[in-house]
Structure formats: C-alpha cells, structure tokens
Image: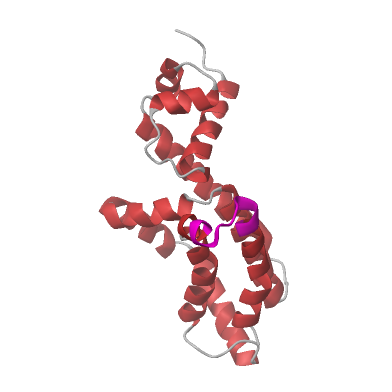
C-alpha cells in the first residue's frame, strides 16, 4: 500500500474547496476533483474514501477557518464596539470573496438535512461567544450608540446586510452584467454603508 502524502492530500482538499465553494460546483464528480488537483482519481478515493467524505471534510475545515478568523479579529481585548463590528465585517467579506458559494450551500443543506440543523443548533447553544456579543449589543444600546431593539434583531440585520448580497450574487452579476471583480468591489463598498445603517 502506498504511503499517504500530506502534500497530495492538501492538494486534493484545496481543489475540492475551489470547485465546491469558489465555483459553486456542488455536484462536481470525483474525476473532476482529481482533474482539478492534477492527480489520479483513485488517489481521491484512497485519501478520502468517497466524494461525500471529502465534501464534508472541506466544508468543516472552511467553516472552522472562518470561525477562527472571526474570533481573532474580534478578540477578547478591550476594543471599541464599532471597531469590533468593522473587523467582523472585514473578515466576513474576505470569506465571501474566498468562498462565495459556501453560504448558498449551508442554507440549502440546512433546509434538506435535519441532522445538520441539529448539529448547528447544538454548536450555537454551547457557544458563549454569541451570548457575549448580544450582551455587548445591549450595552451599546444603553449608551445610545445604536438604535434600541432586541439585540438579536441587530445581529439579524448585520448578518442579512452581509450575507444576502453574497447569496444572490450569481443572479445579480447577470442582471447588472458585473464581472467578479466589479461585484467584489461593490461588496467592499458596502462596509461603510452597513456601518452607517447599524450605528448612530
């Protein structure tokens, strides 16, 4: 039996991430993944057993990467709330540029897969970061820096303003006749607009 090579394994995962979440080819075959990675199809099965195993693995790694970047951008240090929101927006936009189709996949997966819904809900319930963030939002409302509303509504507003344009980008790029670069530029310009809408 051949010895597994971490470089080849990563090469296959990177190719799969590009096909699945950068190009939106969720039904890419094992052969297409192998071709994109520049390896033999049997190597994909050797390293990952099946396309579905590979898909789940690269999805898990991509989500963990974003979570880590969001945590590091916000940090636990004593930074102003506005700066914290600015960093969150920066990381979310960067992630959407890297994996523009991941949110589309997650939404469709949540609708189709009850087990996946339960996994996500379980992770949210045991995550203290969300509770801390909502507490910070409430404190900022009391300071008068943002409009008063249920803190969860602030979070929903922020996430909607960030994620919706990413989810609908395939349609909007066609309607607006925008290139990938033009659409990314429009999304980048949204940072100031979002901050103005969220903060006083």
Residue 152, image x, y percentages: 46, 78
Left or right? Give the position of 29 relative to 87: left
Q: Is residue 170 left or right of residue 121?
A: right
Q: Residue at x 63, y 64 (%)?
A: 186
Majority secondary structure of the magenta segment?
helix
Residue in view at x 44 percent, y 27 percent: 32
Q: List x then y, in percent, for residue 160.
A: 49, 70
Identify the image quadrant of residue 108.
Answer: bottom left
Residue 83: image quadrant is bottom right
Q: Can residue 68 be seen?
A: no
Tell me if I can see residue 165 in this picture: yes
| Colour mapping | secondary structure
What residue is rendered at 47% in x and 85% in y? Answer: 150
Is residue 168 rendered magenta in the image? Answer: no
- Quadrant of the rendered image containing residue 123: bottom left
Q: Residue at x 64, y 92 (%)?
A: 144
**Quadrant in which the C terminus appears:** bottom right
Q: Which residues are magenta?
A: 173-183
Measured from the top left, where is residue 6 in percent x and y?
57, 23
Judge by depth and name the residue closer to the eye, 167 or 91: 167
Count of numbered marks: 0
Image height of 88 relative to 136, above or below: above
Which residue sits furthest top? 1
Screen quadrant of the N terminus: top left
Percent across and percent down for residue 167 are 46, 59
């Amino acid at each position: 039996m051949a010895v597994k090579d971490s470089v080849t394994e990563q090469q296959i995962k990177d190719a799969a991430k590009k096909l699945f979440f950068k190009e939106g080819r969720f039904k890419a075959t094992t052969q297409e993944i192998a071709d994109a990675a520049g390896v033999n199809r049997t190597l994909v099965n050797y390293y990952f057993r099946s396309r579905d195993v590979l898909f789940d693995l690269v999805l898990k790694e991509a989500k963990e990467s974003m979570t880590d970047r969001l945590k590091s951008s916000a940090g636990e240090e004593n930074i102003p709330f506005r700066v914290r929101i600015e960093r969150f927006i920066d990381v979310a936009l960067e992630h959407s540029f890297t994996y523009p189709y991941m949110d589309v996949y997650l939404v469709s997966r949540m609708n189709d897969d009850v087990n996946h819904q339960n996994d996500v809900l379980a992770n949210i319930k045991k995550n203290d970061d969300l509770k801390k963030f909502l507490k910070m939002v409430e404190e900022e409302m009391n300071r008068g820096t943002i409009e008063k509303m249920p803190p969860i509504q602030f979070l929903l507003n922020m996430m909607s303003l960030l994620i919706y344009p990413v989810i609908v980008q395939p349609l909007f790029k066609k309607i607006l006749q925008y290139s990938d670069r033009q659409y990314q530029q429009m999304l980048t310009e949204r940072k100031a607009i979002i901050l103005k809408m969220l903060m006083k």
